[in-house]
Image (spheres, rainbow, N blue to C red):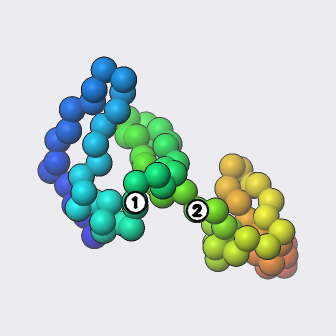
C-alpha cells in the first residue's frame, strides 16, 4: 500500500507531524518509538520492533548489523549453506 502526496513543514526544532491516516494504517500510536534511518536522500521512519526481525520472538535476542535476531533464527540461519 502506498499513501503519498502529503506535504508537511518541519518546525524550528526539526519536528514534523505524521499524517493521522498513515499512523492509523500502520498501527502507530502516541508514545510509540520510531526507528529513524537515512537512506540516500530519504529519511525512513519505521515502527520499532522489540522482537526478532524475522519472527518477532524475544527469546535469546542478539544484535546483528543493528537488528535483533532471536536464538532460533540464528540457529536456522547457521544451518543454511
Ligand atoms: Zn526469530
Quadrant (top left, top right, bottom left, bottom right) of the C terminus: bottom right
Q: Is residue 77 left or right of residue 43?
A: right
The number of discs equals 2
Q: Is residue 67 above or below residue 55?
A: above
Q: Write the residue at 24% across / 52% down.
A: 19
Give the crowd class for mark 1: few <14, some 14-19, many >=20 residues within 10 Å.
few
Q: Is residue 57 left or right of residue 3?
A: right
Quadrant (top left, top right, bottom left, bottom right) of the N terminus: bottom left
Q: Is residue 11 left or right of residue 77?
A: left
- Residue 69 seen anywhere in this rendered image of the structure: yes
- Residue 74 seen anywhere in this rendered image of the structure: no
Q: Position of residue 31 (x, y in %)?
A: 46, 52
For label 1, the SS is loop
**Residues at circles 2 and 1 in contact by the CB criterion of under 8 Å:** no
Q: Position of residue 13 (x, y in %)?
A: 36, 23
Q: Is residue 48 above or below residue 51?
A: above
CA distance separating discs 2 and 1: 14 Å
Q: Position of residue 51 (x, y in %)?
A: 66, 67
For label 2, the SS is loop
Tell me the residue that label 1 is attached to: 29
Tell me the residue that label 2 is attached to: 49
Q: Observer-nearest residue: 78 or 25?
A: 25
Q: Position of residue 66 (x, y in %)?
A: 69, 49
Residue 41 found in image quarter: top left
Q: Write the residue at 21% across / 32% down.
A: 9
Q: Which mark is first along the chain, 1 or 2?
A: 1
Q: Write the residue at 32% across / 60% down.
A: 23
Q: Is residue 3 above or below residue 71?
A: above
Q: Write the residue at 68% across / 68% down.
A: 52
Amino acid at each position: 500500500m502506498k499513501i503519498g502526496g502529503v506535504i508537511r513543514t518541519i518546525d524550528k526544532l526539526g519536528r514534523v507531524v505524521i499524517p493521522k491516516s498513515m499512523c492509523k494504517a500502520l498501527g502507530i500510536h502516541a508514545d510509540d518509538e520510531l526507528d529513524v534511518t537515512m537512506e540516500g536522500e530519504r529519511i525512513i521512519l519505521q515502527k520499532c520492533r522489540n522482537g526478532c526481525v524475522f519472527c518477532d520472538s524475544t527469546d535469546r535476542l542478539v544484535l546483528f548489523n543493528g537488528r535483533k535476531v532471536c536464538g532460533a533464527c540464528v540457529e536456522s540461519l547457521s544451518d543454511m549453506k
